[in-house]
Image (cartoon, rainbow, N blue to C red):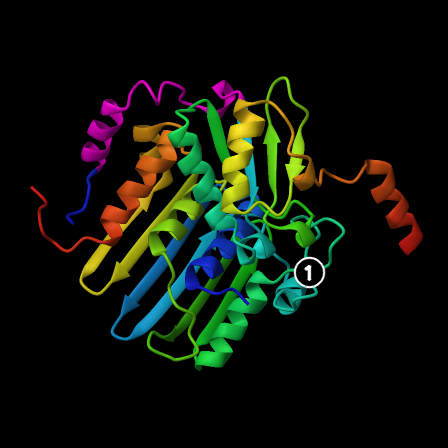
Amino acid sequence: MAKMTLEDLRKLRDTKRRELDMRDAENKTIQVIVGMGTSGIAAGAKDTLAAFLRELEEQGISNVSLRQTGSLGLDHAEPTVEIRMPEMPTVIYGKVSPAVAAKIVRKHIVGKSLINDHIYDRPAADIVEGAEDRKE
Amino acid sequence: MHFTLGELLLDLVQNAAAAGSTTVRVTWRERGGELLLAVEDDGCGMTGDFVARATDPFITDGVKHPGRPVGLGLAFLRQTAESTGGRFRLDSQPGEGTHVALEAPADHIDLPPAGDVSESLVLALCSEGPQEIEIERERGGNSYTIRKSELEEVLGDLSSVVGRRLLGEFVRSQEEDDGKDDA
């Protein structure tokens, strides 16, 4: 394999111009945010991210921003993934294996229904503050 | 412990991003049987007192993991240096940035495997925050430099589905270059 140049990459992009019509994240209506902290990676977050990419391509969905972040604070449930999209509540899914990632694309993003047995969400702010108070 | 060098690197780049860096320079070089893995940033930096404690796994600045007093990236890197007879360096100045590096024998049995280098570099390039992430890579006779700004100029948003796919293809072509033209 020879190295691809930036010009090669530009030509490749042009062949997929229609898919690349949104040039920044602001235009994307759906955000998939994968926790890629130490514990997430140890639990397989890289495979999870790859599975999202694969399934989104297979479903022909391009209006998605596929982001990565550090720990979402739910280490016991890694890999964790936050989904933000219109007409659906923001949800943090946990224990997202590649198979669950594919299910999230098909059911949550396409079908607009929740996958209840993988919802972990964030703890409510008052619970977190209460825990901090109890430590002192 | 991180399983691969790529995971160690990603942790360091995430630290640099969390430090509010504008520019992050990464070096991953295997030359003459020696490995150099280094990350240099222009983020908020650390005080001398904090640098002295930064490789304690139970010390963190509280920014990356609010409420959770654990920070493993630098501790893992130092541990890798110690277990391979290599060298760990950490230089930092408040307001100027941080330079962290691992030097180690590339064939040491206790050195973690490189892992999927292309995948790790893509993940590093997609780290949010820094405007510029420059990666210098050298292995055997193959060397290349890639910059986030140039890739964004060509691909637009790297977090898009197609952008990530093309970025992966581009980085893999750099990493797997054998000097032969495919045509």
Tell whether B1 sits left or right of A11: right
Q: How many marks?
A: 1
In the picture, the quarter occupied by the C terminus of chain B is top left
| Magenta stretch holds residue B81 | no
Task: Measuring from the top left, give residue B131's x and y in whole percent.
Answer: 45, 37
Of A29 and B8, nearer the camera is A29
Q: Give residue B25's position: percent from left, percent from top.
A: 40, 51
- Residue A59 in the image: x percent, y percent? 41, 27
Q: Residue shown at 40%/33% (left/top)?
A: B158
Answer with the quarter of the image where residue B61 lies.
bottom right
Q: Quadrant of residue A130?
A: top right
Describe residue B122's horizontal placement relative to residue B145 as left or right. right
Percent position (x, y) of residue B40?
45, 55
Residue farthest to the bottom, as pictured: B85
Secondary structure state at the residue bearing disc 1: loop
Q: How crowded is mark 1: few (under 14 residues within 10 Å), some or many (20 or more)?
A: some
Q: Which residue is drawn at 42% across and 24% down?
A: A62
Can I make out residue B17 in this image?
A: yes
Q: What residue is shown at x 72% (from left), y 48% (from top)?
A: B66
Residue B129 seen in render: no
> Identity of the amino acid at label 1?
Val
As drawn, A27 above or below A129: above
User: Mark 1 = which residue?
Assistant: B70
Quadrant for the N terminus of chain B in the image: bottom right
Rendered position, A15 above or below B13: above
The stretch of residues the image draws in magenta is: A6-29
**Residue A17 magenta:** yes
Foreground of the two, A100 or A56: A100
Which chain is mark 1 on?
A: B
